Image: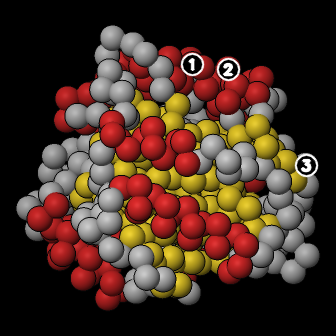
Amino acid sequence: MHKLTQNTRTDIRSLCFEGGVDEHHAVIRIIQPMLSFCEQRDNILTALRELTEGQLPGARPVFLRFFLSDAANQSGLLTEALADFPPCACSIIEQPPLDGTKIALWVYLQTQVTPRSFLEGLTGIEHNGYVHLWGGSACRPGTDSHEQTRRLLEDYATALEDNGGRLADNCIRTWFFVQNIDVNYAGVVKARNEVFLHQGLTRDTHFIASTGIAGRNADPSLCVQLDTYAVTGLVPEQVHHLYASTHLNRTYEYGVSFERGTYVDYGDRRQVFISGTASIDNRGQIVHAGDIRQQTERMWENVEALLKEAGMNYDDIGQMIVYLRDPGDYQTVERLFNARFPNMPRVTVLAPVCRPGWLIEMECMGTCKWTDKRFRAF
């Protein structure tokens, strides 16, 4: 469903469980791009309040991600306005919305929960024996992307341990936002490979679902920013990794260490996290070089294959984030997505993918009802 006001559009997807925690994804966008940043910010935050107070009574934001057009000038103004909001994991990244506005928001909400702060700067919820830990906008100083990434991951591994978890056992999803990705991504890859090996994450065990994409922090000296999601209280049998080997290759074949997707089974539902996915084949080659339409269609096909492996499909998806290298492709891509996914909570941003030949990438998260009596409910 969606809600229109004079200045905003809110698209919502919900999955409701009788007697359980309901999940909602919403993307809030501005529809009056001529407004100033502060006006756009205030309209976004008003729509967020109305969401929790009116449309989704009892729902609380668990994770927020704000997409800004100019983080250096806008981050401080946004942070000030968020000061009176309840505790919630929050990510702020410069990835300009390609509809010509200055700010957009993806928010993940749940009912029957109370987000709170945990150790080491993580925020999340504790429910039914699980602790869901979200982290947003983590950064560490360092001389280059390799040192910054290494410090980020080492500190995050320590934070998980302080909260009763381990990187290899409990981290479900990461996002690496990389300034000038064509230059700095190699350092991110090298550091992640090194830390993962030390943490026992190898090609023979598993990696972590992830997106590595261009994004800029307000501080120009910080070339890597990290968002994270982990769950403690899981047993190994609850976590599964997706490969879709008919369509995609294993990432270690070209030197990187992440999973194409991950799903987690609970007693009442299955959650899926699809990593950043582009137009690639099962040999690791770019498909349809230079053709944005065909790359979009192959990307959809790849995501569909991953979802099918999890016993799910696009009807189970709650949100999509679409990344474009060339803003000139926006109108074409928007028409394609509007035709196939007209009411999907979705934001399309300017964010080059880690390989120049990939013109487009997407990620998504979803949930379906799933009964498994071996495990506790969500």
Residue 303 visible? The answer is no
- Give the vertical position of 357 relative to 194 (above or below): below
- Amino acid type for the residue under numbered disc 2: Thr
Measuring from the top left, give residue 90's x and y in whole percent: 58, 45
Q: In front here: 283 or 149?
A: 149
Q: Residue at 55%, 48% (x, y): give it.
A: 81
At horizontal 19% and vertical 54% (from top left) the residue drawn is: 325
How crowded is the residue under tag 2: few (<14 C-alpha within 10 Å), some, or many (20+)? some
Contact, mark 2 vs mark 1 (Cβ under 8 Å) = yes
Q: Amino acid at mark 1?
A: Glu
**Residue at (64, 24) in percent of width and height:** 157
Location of residue 367 in the rendering, given as x and y in whole percent from the top left corner: 65, 70
* Residue at which label 1 appears: 154
Q: Secondary structure at mark 2?
A: helix
- Which residue is tagged 3? 129
The span from disc 2 to disc 1 (Cα, nearest Å) is 6 Å
Of the two numbered discs 2 and 3 on the same chain, state the one appearing first in sequence.
3
The numbered disc on residue 207 is: none
Residue bearing the label numbered 2: 158
Residues under numbered marks 3 and 1 in contact, where contact means CB atoms less than 8 Å apart: no
Question: Callout 1: helix, strand or loop?
Answer: helix
CA–CA distance between discs 2 and 3? 21 Å
Question: Could you say whether the residue bearing mark 3 is in a helix, strand or loop?
Answer: loop
Q: Residue furthest toward the top? A: 143
Label 1 neighbour load within 10 Å: few <14, some 14-19, many 20+: some
